[in-house]
Amino acid sequence: MNFTFRQLRLFLALAETGSVSAAAKAMHVTQPTASMQLKEISASVGLPLYEVIGKKIFLTETGKALAVIARDITQSLASFEQLAHATKGIAKGHLRIAVVSTAKYFMPRLIGSFCKRYPMIDVSLEILNRDGVLGRLRQNTDDLYIMSMPPDDVVLIDEVLMPNPIVVIAASADPLAKQHNVTLNDLRNRRFILREPGSGTRMAADQHFRKKKFRADIRLALGSNEAVKESVAGGLGIGVISQYALHGHQKEHGVRVINVDEFPLKSSWHLVHLAAKNLSPIALAFKAHLMREINGK
């Protein structure tokens, strides 16, 4: 087999994006050039690496195996480059982070302060739902991951970053917003607007409701905090969201936090990565930066 490292990176981009045009864009080449190079890789291997069915691309078993190897080689070379830069005393390189959608309310600020300290480091931030982050974690796509409710079926290095209180909200004009002591029993005839199944916030709410043997009347399950807040503000029901999603401006969203017994639920933000992963110097520097910023040191 004879193909270049750049071609290997192009194939990895194809595997991660599922699109020749997206892979070409990621590698800053034209689509015809990307298509030609991908054909050269397949010819060099001597076996088909992917199939095009309709408008979708599916990797063959050989393609999946090559994608794993390509990812390992790319990450190993990136770690070596960062080590070389660190040895020279130059903080330069690339950091990849994937976070769940609710973390978008605080992560850009933390990344911004890191970039000010290390201006030669490029940071890629992927903001996804929990299932999307889990998929990237299992494939070891990124350096670090931030989520609540980490999976228990993956061997991880798991560090708790900070609390992630889960609150109940109602429309500002709702009578519940003015009550000081609300019980779950008071909410038995109310309709709930929750995050989608599988999200960390939804998992925390479901666990609490099961523990209390409370059956919530779920009217809507939505894929974003903004959609939950807008639906609650519109009077469609009461919601359960992370307090971070309010970012201190309840009135602007037209909602109020309700004082429900045993809420806010205790949850936490976690910084995780695969236990078998050797973190690069840059990833280690970012971990240390997060701890300093969060702990105020």
Image (tube, rainbow, N blue to C red):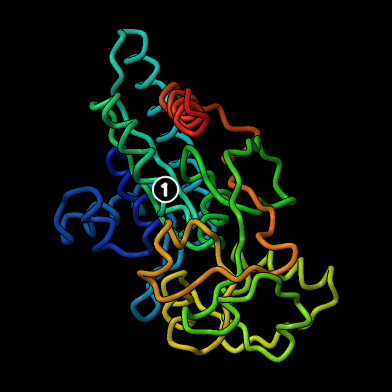
- Regarding residue 76, the answer to whether it shows in the image is no
Residue ID at (44%, 30%): 293
- Seen in the picture, residue 161 relative to 10 is either above or below; the reply is above
Q: How many tags in the picture?
A: 1
Q: Residues within 10 Å of mark 1 (few under 14, many from 20)?
A: few
Front residue of 1 and 250:
250
Look at 74% across and 83% down and name the residue there: 186
Q: Whole-percent x and y of residue 51?
A: 41, 69
Q: Position of residue 197 (x, y in %)?
A: 62, 73
Q: Could you say where residue 26 lies in the image, as x and y percent from the top left?
A: 25, 51
Can you say which quadrant of the picture contains the N terminus?
Answer: top left
Q: Is 109 situated left or right of 157 in this image?
A: left
Q: Which residue is mark 1?
A: 106
Please state which of residues 23 and 164 is positioned toward the viewer in this rendering: 164
Viewer can see residue 77:
yes
Q: Residue at x 65, y 70 (%)?
A: 180
Label 1: state its secondary structure. Answer: loop
Residue farthest to the top, as pictured: 88
Label 1 is placed on what type of residue?
Phe
Left or right: where 175 falls relative to 124: right
Please tell me which residue is depicted at 45% across the width and 48% down the height of the picture: 98
Q: In the drawing, does residue 91 fall left or right of residue 156?
A: left
Report whether 11 appears left or right of 132: left
Q: Position of residue 24 (x, y in %)?
A: 22, 55
